[in-house]
Every structure is written in structure tokens, then in C-alpha cells.
Image: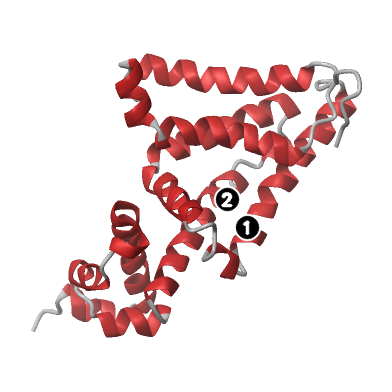
Amino acid sequence: MAKTAKDARKNDPERTREDILEVATEEFSEFGLSGARVDSIAEKTRTSKRMIYYYYGSKEGLYLAVLERAYRKIRSLESDLQLSALPPQEALRQLIGTTFDHDEENPDFVRLVSIENIHHAMHMKRSSVIADLNISVIRTIQDILDRGLATGAFKRQADAIDVHMLISAFCFFRVSNRYTFGTIFERDLSEANLYARHKSLITDAVLSYLRSDNLAGEGGS
């Protein structure tokens, strides 16, 4: 007798967990933590609430696992770029471009982060993973900044977290506010020419900032 997909997954718990996280990402990003239903996730993954709670302990535990998976994905993309092998300006261009494309292609990530901000990051604070994951991007940016100063490509002694915030703010805003912004100003932010222009805009803005001298009285990193 042929095995069903459900039977096959019983022997592949890793795949089962990944399926649950995939569907849970859609559920939480669509309905938020309070509105998401574990029953719905179980039905769509052809598992059971009991199995989901076995793996993740609770609805909040599943939500936190979804958050960790989302951050792990973007940090993994960044590490795959091998930016330390590139000249500092090119490395920063690659990092910004990757962040820009990731946020555009992963609106679920943007919605999840927005939801967690509504909850004042109370669930994220329980994670022993997310903080460590995000240290990596700051170290990467710091390395780029240090190399840029050493080679003369950059003049400004910038703070790595400030630079990360600058990049993230623009890339995140385009996705998080695309409907309100698009409605108010009658612009489709996903339109190809506008997409390319905005990608160039944030890249040029960050590089121009780093190439300029520190203002008088401004502290460095």
C-alpha cells in the first residue's frame, strides 16, 4: 500500500517541523499572534495540535520559533555573500541590495517584525537565538566600515548599528507602508523602475554618508 504524505512525514520530523513553521509564518503574519489559530495551522499541515505543541510547547512557543526562523533566513543570506572578500564599497552595495531584495520578497518577515513591535518585543526577549543572530550583521558592517576607513574609501567614523538602522529603515518602510504610502501618493512601490530607483537611492545615500567627513563636533563610533 502506497504511503501518504502524512505517513511519510512521520518518519521525517525535520520536514514536519519545517512544514509547520512555513504555514505558521503565513498564519501569524496574516492574523497576528492573537488572531492566529493553531487549529488552522494543524489542518493546513495535516498534523495535529498535539503534535505542534509537542514540538513547540505552546502557541507562543511556535510564534517565537517562527520569528527565529525569519531572522535566521536573512542572516544566512548575508553570510553567504562572503563580503569580507570584497572591497568595502562593493561589499556595502551587496549587503544593501540583499537587504532591499529580501524585504521586498519576504513581506511576511516585515509583518512579523511589525507585530512583535506591537508586543514591545516581549516574545523576542525570551529568545536565546535572535540576539546572537543579529550580532553577526553588526560585525559584518563594522568590518566593512573599518576596511573602508583604512583604505580611504570612507571618511566618516560611523556607528555600525546606525548604518544598519539606516539601511533597514528604508528597506523595511517600503514594504511595511507600501499600501498606505502608495494610496496617499498614488505610486506602486513594486513597479520595476521605481523599485530600481529606490534600491539605488538607499545605496547611494549610505555610501555618500560614509564618504563625507564627520561634521564639526560630531562623535564617531
What is the number of callouts on the image? 2
- Indicate the secondary structure of the residue bearing disc 2: helix
The quarter holding residue 15 reads bottom left
Q: In this view, does 58 lie above or below 197?
A: below
Instruction: Identify which residue is drawn at 46% across, 39% down.
Output: 102
Looking at the image, residue 109 sits to the left or right of residue 147; the answer is: left
Q: Name the residue under label 2.
A: 75
| Residue type for callout 1 | Leu
Few, some or many residues within 10 Å of mark 1 (<14, 14–19, 20+):
some
- Residue at 37% x, 30% y: name it: 178
Task: Report x, y in % for residue 51.
Answer: 30, 83
- First along the sequence among labels 1 and 2: 2
For the question of whether residue 191 can be seen, the reply is no
Instruction: Please tell me which residue lies in front, 56 or 101.
Output: 56
What residue is at 79 percent from the left and 40 percent from the top? 143
Specify the quadrant that holds the N terminus: bottom left
Say which quadrant the C terminus sits in.
top right
Drawn side of residue 139 relative to residue 40, left or right: right
Mark 1 and mark 2 residues within 8 Å of each other at the beta carbon: yes
| Image side of residue 6 versus residue 209, left or right | left
Q: What residue type is labelled 2?
A: Arg
How far apart are labels 1 and 2 at the CA level? 7 Å
Tell me if residue 80 can be seen. yes
Identify the image quadrant of residue 121: bottom right
Q: Tell me what residue is drawn at x 64 percent, y 60 percent.
A: 131
Q: Where is residue 13 in the image (x, y as percent from the top left)?
A: 36, 78
Counting from the top left corner in percent of width and height, residue 104 is at 41, 35
Instruction: Where is residue 184? Give x, y as percent.
Output: 33, 20
Q: Describe the element under mark 1 as helix, strand or loop.
A: helix
Asked which quadrant contains residue 191, the reply is top left
